[in-house]
């Protein structure tokens, strides 16, 4: 297992290229199961979850190549079973259900694992697919679904689930007739998946709003598509610039998808500006101050940026708060930040953060993907050495993070534990 060693206290200066979005690339890769012909996807980040997805596609009968950041995918003969060995490491595998049912009328997918952030059930996916005619049984840890063919339906999600909306978008694209999805997730990654499906010939209207209409088509054809840049990676580097009192320029930063984060950063006295040529500049505009944040479905403040903003609030003046409304149990970074001298108290789903003048380096343990990022950020500003253990979580979601950070002046290196 690898760990990261960080010597804190060095302001970051320079340029960072934002990678392609993991959370957009995953469903788009899985949607390749629906396509007749070859798909060529560019801007795919080289991350553990992507390699796992490619393995899953291969097992399901889709051949892939991955060179640089380009994936080609072509279905040869589709199979319906996604085994536990793969699915247990990545929750997004449940997205196979929609395409497999839509295409084969049968799907057997192990119940997913993934980040340890709360119960994370898939009941909303199943309920919605049932509305389209699928029937499910739970069989030795597998969800086994069958249907004659999926039939268009009107589906109102109880909660705007990102994965659920994506699963149904894929299923409805090849279903018989028209599907109307209501109370949909409006995340940019849902829009990216819809745009990909449209490029393959799907008929989808309204992605990015609460109501999406899908007219099923007989088949989808191959296309070439560029995956959107990763807004959470970009947001993490915005915080890195601010926390180290540095000055960073981000290339390919999807600023328009980061409104909720940017407005909180500005409230904290961080300047974030689009520059000529499209790059984004981040630096402090004054003393950092605490703010109150509540995570919400998009366009509200993203839960995936909560831990990183908390690291920034740890060194801001005054008190701030973070209320987590999307996931239970997503505060595992709190006790680790505490080991670095942060003053955070937790009550139910709200963390109160009292800023301290200085964090102090310590050995800390990463518990999930975004929690790992917050510990790295804290390490960048802490006095002395921070050792972030279990960074396999980080490798699931950040492409070459230590390389990107070293190139802008961070003292950070990877070592074997
Ligand atoms: C996706 C993102 C993840 C992000 C999350 C919320 C990917 C691969 N992952 O996860 O990084 O943090 O959106 O923005 O894109 N829920 C149910 N039943 C369901 C489905 C969800 O109760 O059937 C609950 C979940 O437990 C959670 C909430 O709804 O509390 C949000 O989940 P959802 O939007 O589905 O998140 P994911 O798609 O899993």
Image (tube, rainbow, N blue to C red):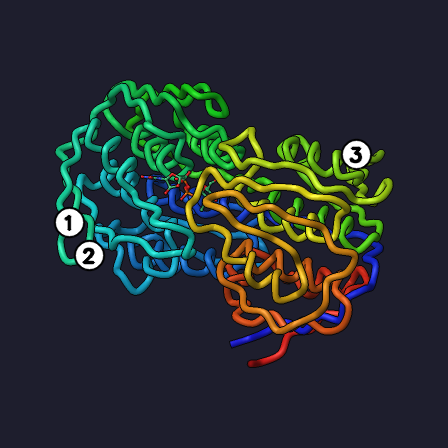
Q: Which residue is mark 1?
A: 138
Q: CA distance from mark 1 to mark 2?
A: 7 Å
Q: Residues within 10 Å of mark 3 (few under 14, many from 20)?
A: some
Q: CA distance from mark 1 to mark 3?
A: 50 Å
Q: Position of residue 272 (x, y in %)?
A: 78, 37
Q: CA distance from mark 2 to mark 3?
A: 48 Å
Is residue 265 found left or right of 158 in the rendered image? right
| In the depicted structure, whether residue 81 falls above or below residue 211 | below
Q: Position of residue 232 (x, y in %)?
A: 60, 45
Quadrant for the C terminus, please. Answer: bottom right
Q: Which residue is mark 3?
A: 274
Question: Disc 1 beta carbon < 8 A from ligand 1?
Answer: no
Q: Position of residue 235 (x, y in %)?
A: 66, 44
Q: Nearer the viewer, mark 2 or mark 3?
A: 2
| In the depicted structure, whether residue 171 falls above or below residue 93 | above
Question: Disc 3 beta carbon < 8 A from ligand 1?
Answer: no
Q: Which mark is residue 141?
A: 2
Residue at the (75%, 39%) spot, across then down: 268
Of the numbered discs 2 and 3, the one sitting upstream in the chain is 2
Is residue 333 found left or right of 290 in the rendered image? left
Look at the numbered disc 1 and give the secondary structure of its residue. strand
| In the depicted structure, whether residue 43 falls above or below residue 192 | below
Q: Nearer the viewer, residue 275 or 138?
A: 138
Of the numbered discs 1 and 3, the one sitting upstream in the chain is 1
The number of numbered discs placed on residues in the rendered structure image is 3
Q: Nearer the viewer, residue 297 or 179?
A: 297
Look at the numbered disc 3 and give the secondary structure of its residue. strand
Tag 1 near tag 2, CB within 8 Å: yes
């Amino acid at each position: 297992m690898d760990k990261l060693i960080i010597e804190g206290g060095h302001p970051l200066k320079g340029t960072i290229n934002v990678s392609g979005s993991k959370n957009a690339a995953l469903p788009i890769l899985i949607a390749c199961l629906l396509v007749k012909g070859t798909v060529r996807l560019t801007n795919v980040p080289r991350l553990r979850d992507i390699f796992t997805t490619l393995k899953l596609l291969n097992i399901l009968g889709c051949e892939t190549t991955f060179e640089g950041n380009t994936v080609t995918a072509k279905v040869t003969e589709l199979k319906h079973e996604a085994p536990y060995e793969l699915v247990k490491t990545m929750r997004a595998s449940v997205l196979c259900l929609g395409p497999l049912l839509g295409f084969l009328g049968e799907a057997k997918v192990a119940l997913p694992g993934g980040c340890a952030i709360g119960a994370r059930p898939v009941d909303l996916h199943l309920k919605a697919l049932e509305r389209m005619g699928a029937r499910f049984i739970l069989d030795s840890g597998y969800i086994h679904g069958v249907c004659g063919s999926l039939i268009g339906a009107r589906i109102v999600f109880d909660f705007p689930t990102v994965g659920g909306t994506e699963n149904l978008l894929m299923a409805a694209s090849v279903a018989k007739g028209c599907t109307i999805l209501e109370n949909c997730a409006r995340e940019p990654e849902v829009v990216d998946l819809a745009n990909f499906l449209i490029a393959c010939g799907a008929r989808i209207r309204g992605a990015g709003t609460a109501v999406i209409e899908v007219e099923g088509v007989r088949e989808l054809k191959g296309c070439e598509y560029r995956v959107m840049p990763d807004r959470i990676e970009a947001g993490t580097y915005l915080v890195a610039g601010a926390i180290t009192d540095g000055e960073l320029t981000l290339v390919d930063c999807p600023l328009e998808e980061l409104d909720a984060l940017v407005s909180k950063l500005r409230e904290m006295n961080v300047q974030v500006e689009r520059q000529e040529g499209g790059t984004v500049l981040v630096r402090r505009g004054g003393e950092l101050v605490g703010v109150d944040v509540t995570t919400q479905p998009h366009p509200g403040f993203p839960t995936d940026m909560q831990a990183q903003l908390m690291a920034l609030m740890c060194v801001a003046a005054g008190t701030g708060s973070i209320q987590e409304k999307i996931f239970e149990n997503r505060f595992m970074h709190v006790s680790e930040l505490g080991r670095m001298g942060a003053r955070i108290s937790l009550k139910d789903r709200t963390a109160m953060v009292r800023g301290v003048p200085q964090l102090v380096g310590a050995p800390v343990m990463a518990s999930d993907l975004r929690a790992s990022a917050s510990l790295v950020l804290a390490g960048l500003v802490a006095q002395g050495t921070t050792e972030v253990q279990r960074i396999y979580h980080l490798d699931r979601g950040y492409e070459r993070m230590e390389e990107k950070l070293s190139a802008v002046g961070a003292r950070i290196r990877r070592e074997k534990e």
